[in-house]
Image (cartoon, rainbow, N blue to C red):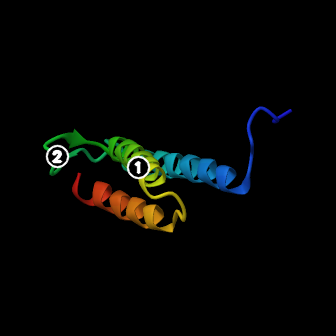
């Protein structure tokens, strides 16, 4: 039934992580409505959801660039992506 995609543990964990982040932001939004919009270093007014999207998009680019330029192992782009996520939610 689910043979259309190669479901491996890393793939499943990626999707669980993304959906967990969306679920967490939904709970936070219900508790503190308004999205906590603010103007960051990029000069954009962003909400929590915008910052999550920028984080996920940047993470995808970090991993693709790393794979294209360096190959494996993928621990370094994971660390860079986590730092990017912290930066996005802190300063963007």
Write down the residue under mark 2: 42
The quadrant of the image that shows the N terminus is top right
Q: Earlier in the sequence, mark 2 or mark 1?
A: 2
Other residues around mark 1 within 10 Å, as few (<14) / some (14–19) / many (≥20): few
Write down the residue under mark 1: 65
Residue at left 29%, top 60%? 87
Q: Is residue 86 left or right of residue 78?
A: left
Image location of residue 31, percent across then percent down = 43, 51
Residue closer to the observer: 47 or 8: 8
Image location of residue 30, percent across then percent down = 45, 45
Residue at left 48%, top 45%? 26
Local SS, label 1: helix
Other residues around mark 2 within 10 Å, as few (<14) / some (14–19) / many (≥20): few
Residue at left 43%, top 46%? 56
Image location of residue 75, percent across then percent down = 51, 67
- Residue 4 to residue 31: above or below: above
- Residue 44 to residue 67: above or below: above
Residue closer to the observer: 64 or 78: 64
Local SS, label 2: loop
């Amino acid at each position: 039934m689910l043979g259309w995609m190669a479901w491996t543990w890393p793939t499943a964990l990626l999707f669980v992580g993304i959906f967990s982040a969306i679920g967490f932001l939904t709970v936070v939004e219900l508790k503190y409505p308004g999205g906590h919009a603010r103007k960051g270093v990029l000069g954009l007014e962003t909400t929590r959801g915008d910052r999550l999207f920028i984080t996920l998009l940047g993470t995808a680019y970090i991993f693709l660039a790393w794979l294209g330029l360096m190959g494996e192992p993928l621990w370094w782009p994971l660390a860079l992506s986590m730092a990017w996520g912290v930066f996005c939610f802190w300063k963007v």
